[in-house]
Amino acid sequence: MDRNATGSDAVSRPGATGWHVQHPRFAAEDLRRAFGCFPSGVVALCGLCDDAPVGMSVSSFTSVSLAPPLVSVCIARQSSTWKVLRHLLRIGLSVLAEDHGQVCRALAAKDADRFGSVPWQASERGAVFVADASLHIECSIEREIDAGDHVLVLLAIEALRSDPAVAPLVFHGSRFRQLSPART
């Protein structure tokens, strides 16, 4: 038995990809609610596969390193979209703008044409970008790291373009929100 930070017992069990700690007092819905207290931006991860766009929305994006230039995302292990994207030469990462709520929903949809209403463009190397996003990063996969029921993906930045004037889409408390000017 292991002890977690609160001193309660946790049970370690071997899983398909390694050891996982199961905390009996944390139900998945409790953790989702707790994690939802932290606002995050929303990005689209997209690429071309057989000349068609493939993509998904992700809310666990962060900058990692300036030298070498790296960013990261966390993706659910069961994602069928990631199973396609992870084999592409280049992946486009678009930081969605505050008016991209419908784009995010389209890219998160199951069993639908995700790009039917999403304006996009592709780079010469097959990275796909959502039009009018605040940041476009052309990436290659640096490394994938086992992280429980997710995989932490380190992405090397190959090219980028940004427009800091475009306000980002914010996800907080299980809904989309917008930034408001700071009060002085």
Image: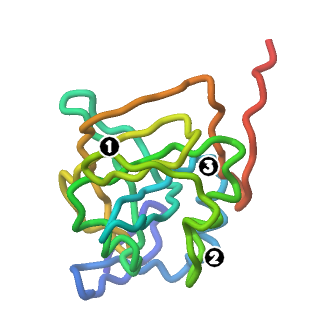
Task: Count residues near mark 3 (Cα–Cα under 10 Å), then give few for <14, some for 14-19, many for 20+.
Answer: few
> Mark 3 falls on what kind of element?
loop
Viewer-nearest residue: 76 or 49: 49
**Coloration mode:** rainbow
The amino acid on which the numbered mark 3 sits, given as a three-letter code, is: Phe
- Please identify the quadrant where the N terminus is shown: bottom left
Q: Position of residue 136 (x, y in %)?
A: 43, 39
Q: Is residue 133 left or right of residue 75?
A: right
Query: What residue do we see at 22% from left, 81% from top?
Result: 17
Q: Earlier in the sequence, mark 1 or mark 3?
A: 3
Determine which residue is flagged by label 3: 38
Task: Count residues near mark 1 (Cα–Cα under 10 Å), then give few for <14, some for 14-19, many for 20+.
Answer: many
Determine which residue is flagged by label 2: 29
159 versus 91 height, above or below: above
Determine which residue is flagged by label 1: 138
Query: What residue do we see at 37% from left, 40% from top?
Result: 137
Task: Count residues near mark 2 (Cα–Cα under 10 Å), then give few for <14, some for 14-19, many for 20+.
Answer: few
46 versus 162 height, above or below: below
> Mark 1 falls on what kind of element?
strand
Q: Is residue 139 left or right of residue 57?
A: left
* Number of numbered discs visible in the structure rendering: 3
Of badges 1 and 2, nearer the viewer stands 1
Q: Position of residue 111 (x, y in %)?
A: 56, 84
Q: How much space separates mark 1 and mark 3, taking CA atoms?
A: 27 Å
Query: What residue do we see at 58% from left, 52% from top?
Result: 119
The amino acid on which the numbered mark 1 sits, given as a three-letter code, is: Glu
